[in-house]
Image (cartoon, coloured by chain):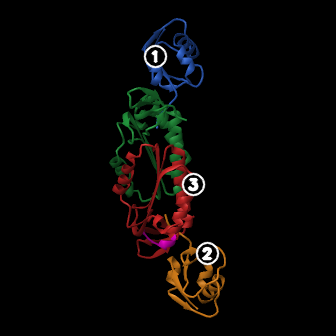
Chain colours: A red, B green, C blue, D orange
Amino acid sequence: MTDKKIKNIFVEGAISTSFIADSIAKHSSKKEIGGHSIFLGQVRADDIDGKVVSAIDYTAYQETALAQMHEIREAIFNKYPLTCMHVYQSLGTIKVGEICLFVFTSSAHRKPAIAACEEIVERLKAELPIWGKEIFEDGTHQWKENK
Amino acid sequence: MTDKKIKNIFVEGAISTSFIADSIAKHSSKKEIGGHSIFLGQVRADDIDGKVVSAIDYTAYQETALAQMHEIREAIFNKYPLTCMHVYQSLGTIKVGEICLFVFTSSAHRKPAIAACEEIVERLKAELPIWGKEIFEDGTHQWKENK
Amino acid sequence: MEINILSFGKIAEFITINRLDTDEIFDTDGLKQQLEKTYPQLKEIKYKLALNKQIVQKNIELLPGDVVAIMPPFSGG
Amino acid sequence: MEINILSFGKIAEFITINRLDTDEIFDTDGLKQQLEKTYPQLKEIKYKLALNKQIVQKNIELLPGDVVAIMPPFSGG
């Protein structure tokens, strides 16, 4: 594992729909692709004991998260015949309704793309040192925990 | 089942990435959504005995396909706690690299959105009377069959 | 009895009639036999019928003016 | 021995030190005991350590200058 192979997944702020559209469009030249699978995480206005979430503030232990993501990437490429795999996680304050996670896999056939995308989402949530602080409308907060 | 409930899924020509971006953006006001799952079918330059596919020409028995899709939609909404479900299938000639299918599900949590999206893709391919004619670069063709 | 015929996909390349006028066919099974006699290529294809837009699951009686679609394996998506 | 400390998430709200200078800690298990004594709230959290950016799976010896991260349950995505 060399450092130069490690790809960054972190973006400051919300992920825009135009960024997602551009990412998809870039794959039109890859003629061997037959299917794309995409997962998007969106910040939800959770109601917790009468307090409503208005935003999530994301922080990460970035270098460790990127090394961990690198391992996941290698495992996924070994397991599934993917053409492409892209992962973007927001950092900073993401408001309700905005996109904070974008996982994108492509393959010649649908099944590997779909299975890989789901596995990346599950592993990312379980294994990457990233934390979401749920900010309530009244300014108080609580720390999110992934199920 | 009344006719007015039946939604159209067919679009003439390829599905543009800006259309996909707009569809995603429309969901930012739905504050109860936590995850979106998207599947995109892209026309692949399959090499069949030395002949390369350059486009797929899609036709459908539209009314029957829409009635069948309506049944699938109802079954999926009964099975999964979805917020939204959108399906678009191209008709006409779609060139290699272009998007011909767009399935989009949203839910409060990731698992229903992901499972529903995959099930819709599988059922659509198996149950909807739609046909893809693979046009080779030399102008000949063959009829696609879903596996 | 006159039946309206719709053909799709590769089947539309050899079944090009729009109407079938016959006194020998009473149900979808009979129609299939008749079609396979006239168009032997049909026997090689796992086709399905739709009767008045509903996909046929088992043999059904035909009535004058019915619309029968002859559909090769699906390949949408 | 001087160890560098990084705290994240809700743990950063009560462990605010950047460095720990002690002659009584030799490994990560010892460090955990020490931290839980000083910060009893830590016992309520399923935290993990990372040593020099690698997530700690089992007890590891500490060396002067090591960087130890104290990480509450992850909630990315």
Give SS at disc 3. helix
Q: Which residues are magenta?
A: A54-64
Across and down, in percent, residue B34 comes to 47, 59
Mark seen at residue A8: none
The residue lying at 55 percent from left, 35 percent from top is: B147
Cα–Cα gap, marks 1 and 2: 68 Å
Q: Nearer the viewer, residue B57 or B101?
A: B57
The chain to which mark 1 is attached is: C
Helix, strand or loop status at disc 1: loop
Please name the amino acid that badge 2 sits on: Val
Taking the magenta stretch, the answer to whether it contains residue A55 is yes
Q: Do the residues under discs 1 and 2 have CB atoms within 8 angstroms?
A: no
Three-letter amino acid code of the residue under disc 3? Asn
| Secondary structure mostly taken by the magenta-highlighted segment of the chain | strand
Q: Relative to residue C68, is residue A131 depicted above or below?
A: below
The crowd level at tag 1 (other Cα within 10 Å; few <14, some 14-19, many 20+) is few
For residue B8, say whether it is visible: no
User: What residue is pinned by disc 3?
Assistant: A78
**Residue designated by label 1:** C14
Asked which secondary structure carries label 2, the reply is: loop
Task: Say left or right for B18 vs A117.
Answer: left
Q: Position of residue A43 (x, y in %)?
A: 44, 63
Chain letter, disc 3 residue? A
Q: CA distance from mark 3 to mark 2?
A: 25 Å
In the image, is B76 to the left or to the right of B63?
right
Write down the chain letter for disc 2. Answer: D
Mark 1 or 3: the one toward you: 3
Observer-nearest residue: D65 or A16?
A: D65
Q: Say which residue appears at 53% left-offset and 75% top-offset.
A: D53
Task: Residue B63: give x, y in percent of width and height.
Answer: 43, 29
- Pointer 2 residue: D56
Which of discs 3 and 2 lies nearer the camera? The answer is: 3
